[in-house]
Image (spheres, rainbow, N blue to C red):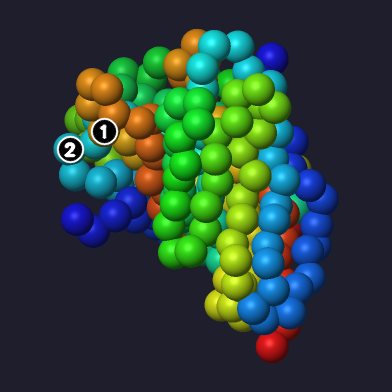
């Protein structure tokens, strides 16, 4: 079990550019979540997938944001026309849905985005 | 809606001191409760969890008890170490919303 991995760990971009982040969940975890964390705050839910289906999106996820999980394994989060307000840590988490078990999500190390 | 409130930090303690970080929640139904820890520059690590009233989660000397009557899940440790310096997040998972909701985090600084 290698844990949740994210790539890149850091991204610096200029305002208006597009960026894409990748998340590889723990093997066989069928649920995958994206969160955004700004400085001094707790993570805020953005969206989640069950297998390849995107089941819910937060109102925080503007139309410049899009997430995919094409084969139910890794996921990508793309931000188009980045703005300075998009600067944050983007966290990915995965969870295995087991009956009767606690709803535990395991987090990756995050991708820190800086928009200049 | 569901929410989590933590005591404001930073909390500064000397090594071997007793730690309490308060956490209270508001939720419909019966959420699962969690404490996560975040070290500088890293993602969140699950520290402990509790799924029903009166459950006690424990790990690495940290403990928290799910108190339904006071809607609380306070984190405690009897003797902190410098290596415990980090940001601690209390969170709840509600099956009603299907979301993990976090508090704002409490920074702990332990001095030798």
Q: Position of residue A24 (x, y in %)?
A: 30, 47
* Mark seen at residue A96: 1
Q: Nearer the viewer, residue B58 or A57?
A: B58
Compared to residue B97, the image places residue B37 above or below, namely below
Q: Nearer the viewer, residue A24 or A114?
A: A24
- Which residue is drawn at the image coordinates 29% and 29% (left, top)? A101
- Can residue A68 be seen here? The reply is no
Q: Nearer the viewer, residue B42 or B34?
A: B34
- Can residue B26 be seen here? The reply is yes
- Which residue is drawn at the image coordinates 29% and 44% (left, top)? A25
Q: Position of residue B77 (x, y in %)?
A: 59, 62
Q: Nearer the viewer, residue B69 or A11?
A: B69
- Which residue is drawn at the image coordinates 60% and 66% (left, top)? B78
Please give left or right for residue A48 compared with residue A72 in the image.
Answer: right
Q: Earlier in the sequence, mark 1 or mark 2?
A: 2
Chain where mark 2 sits: A
Q: Position of residue B55 (x, y in %)?
A: 46, 35
Compared to residue A49, the image places residue A86 above or below, namely below
- Label 1 Cα crowd, 10 Å radius (few <14 / some 14-19 / many 20+): some
Look at mark 2 in the image and give the residue it sits on: A28
Please give left or right for residue A33 compared with residue B111 in the image.
Answer: left
Kindly indicate the quadrant of the structure image that contains residue B86: bottom right
Considering the image in quadrants, where does the C terminus of chain A appear? bottom right
Q: Position of residue A9 (x, y in %)?
A: 47, 62
Considering the image in quadrants, where does the N terminus of chain A appear? bottom left
Under circle 2, the secondary element is loop
Q: Are marks 1 and 2 in contact (CB under 8 Å)?
A: yes
- Label 2 Cα crowd, 10 Å radius (few <14 / some 14-19 / many 20+): few
């Amino acid at each position: 079990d290698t844990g949740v991995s994210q790539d890149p760990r850091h991204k610096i971009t200029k305002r208006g550019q597009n960026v894409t982040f990748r998340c590889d969940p723990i093997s066989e975890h069928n649920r995958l979540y994206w969160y955004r964390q700004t400085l001094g705050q707790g993570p805020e839910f953005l969206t989640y997938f069950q297998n390849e289906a995107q089941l819910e999106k937060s109102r925080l996820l503007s139309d410049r944001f899009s997430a995919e999980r094409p084969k139910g394994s890794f996921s990508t989060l793309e931000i188009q026309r980045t703005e300075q307000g998009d600067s944050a840590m983007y966290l990915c988490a995965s969870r295995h849905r087991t009956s009767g078990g606690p709803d535990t999500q395991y987090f990756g190390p995050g991708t820190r985005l800086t928009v200049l | 809606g569901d929410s989590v409130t933590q005591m404001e930090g930073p909390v500064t303690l000397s090594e071997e001191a007793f730690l309490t970080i308060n956490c209270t929640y508001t939720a419909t139904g019966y959420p699962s409760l969690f404490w996560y820890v975040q070290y500088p520059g890293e993602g969140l690590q699950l520290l402990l969890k509790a799924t029903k009233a009166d459950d006690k989660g424990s790990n690495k000397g940290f403990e928290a008890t799910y108190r339904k009557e006071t809607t609380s899940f306070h984190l405690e440790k009897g003797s902190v170490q410098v290596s415990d310096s980090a940001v601690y997040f209390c969170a709840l998972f509600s099956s009603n919303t299907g979301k993990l909701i976090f508090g704002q985090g409490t920074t702990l600084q332990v001095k030798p």
